[in-house]
Every structure is written in C-alpha cells, then in structure tokens.
Image (tube, rainbow, N blue to C red):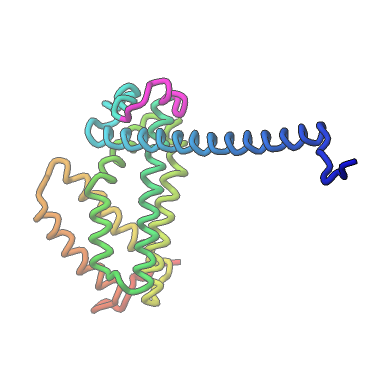
Amino acid sequence: MTQQTGVAMPARARRTQEMRSAEMRDKLLYATLDVLMEARRLGTIASLMAATLDLLVERGYGGLTMAGVAGRAGVSRGALLHHYPTRADLLAAAIERLLDDEIVEIRGMAASVRSGAIGLDAFVDDLWRRFSGRLFYITLEHITAARTDPDLRDVLLPIVKRFHVALDQMWTEFFAARGTADRATTTVLNLTLCLLRGMGAQTVLKPDPDYYQELLRAWKTILATLVEGRGTGGMPHLPD
C-alpha cells in the first residue's frame, strides 16, 4: 500500500481561490480603466480650455461658439456639452483655469520676492506683462460679457476674487520683506493695478510700446518714492 504524500485541495476550496484570483484581476482591470478614463477626461477638458481661451483672444466673446470650440479642441459637440452644457459654463471654467494658472505663477513670484531675487522694477514689469497681453485681453472679454449677464457675473465673481487675493498676498509679502507692510500697501497696489489696466485698455487703439515704457519708467520712479521713502517720508498716510 502506497503511503500518501500530499492532500489534494477540496474542490470547493479550489473554486474559492480561483474566484478570489478572478476578483483581484477584475479589480485591477477596473482600476486601470478608471485611470485611463480619468486621463482621457482631463485631456478633453484641457483641450477645451485651451481652445476656448485661444478663440477668446482671436474672436472675442461674441465670436465664441460651442461648435467652434469643439472643432478647435478636436472633440465632438456631444463631448463638449457633456462637460459644459452652456457657453457661460464653458467661459467660467476657462477663466477659472486661466486665473488659477496665473495664481501659480504669482505664488512663484512671491517666493522670489521673499528671497530677494525680484526687485521693485521687475515686479512692475511682470504686472505689466500680465496686463498688456493675453491675460488682459481675455479679461476684457469676460468683463464685457459679465456686464450684461448677471448669471455669468455671479459665477465669475468668486473666481476673479481668488485671483486678486493672490495678488494682494504677493504685494503684501513684497512690502513685508522691506518692513513696510501696512494698510497703505493696498492703496499703492490698487493705484498700480488701475494704472496698468488703463494702459492695457489703451493698447487696443494705441499700439505704441515706447509710449507705455515711458509711462512705466515714470511710475516706477513714483513707486520707489512711495515704497522706499525717498524724499517723501515713506508710505502715504491713510486717515483712520
């Protein structure tokens, strides 16, 4: 009689193990599909955002159509409508993407300000770049659209507010590094932004780079006087 050297696994146990292995394979498959689908979704959204912003610059809000965006992005109209049912939804999402990207850059500048790598002139030059190019021209379009569209305005207000909060933070850090951060810094920031916005709007009908550089040089001199106190006793005093 031959001695048994092993015990065969019961059929039920084998089936249970096979089921668990199959379940594990299915879970891995579904997880992989989820990752691929999410990557595809994010890719579609990125294409739609880029197409929307490009068309805003090229054609303005009046020339921004859902069909045009879908065609530029290389997606079907159905795919576009799945993500953004209306033109207002599409515009709001694109502006949010644009300003969020700007905030990332602004925070990077803030780090350079803290390290002392960026001075006052470079700071103003960077702001002028933002307010005289693509960012500003897109801003003109969504401001014009929001003026007569209360629903769009309500959607854009918190998005734009986050952008300005980031600007405020960078500006405050700039002055804090010089030991002059106080309530007056907000006034100086607003003066600078209002000047640059006005100059940016003027570029539409007055394309004269030398003219704007002259204005920038003049403002940098004034700003240095306000910030560094050369000849004026420092930052302007604000009444309580």
Residue 156 forms part of the magenta stretch = no
Q: In this view, does 137 lie above or below 226?
A: above
Q: Is residue 185 above or below residue 166?
A: below
Horizontal relation, residue 88 to residue 199: left or right:
right
Residue closer to the observer: 175 or 198: 175
Q: Is residue 144 visible?
A: no
Report x, y in % for residue 31. 58, 38
Q: Is residue 168 above or below residue 46?
A: below
Report x, y in % for residue 162. 45, 50
Q: In this view, does 115 lie above or below 190?
A: below
Main secondary-structure element of the magenta-colored stretch: helix
Q: Can residue 212 be seen in this view?
A: yes
The residue shown at (34%, 63%) is 109
Quadrant housing the N terminus: top right
The residue shown at (42%, 61%) is 169
Say which quarter of the image contains residue 4.
top right
Magenta region, residue range: 73-85
Residue closer to the observer: 180 or 4: 4
Residue closer to the observer: 135 or 215: 135
Report x, y in % for residue 190. 34, 57
Horizontal relation, residue 129 to residue 175: left or right:
left
Report x, y in % for residue 6. 82, 44
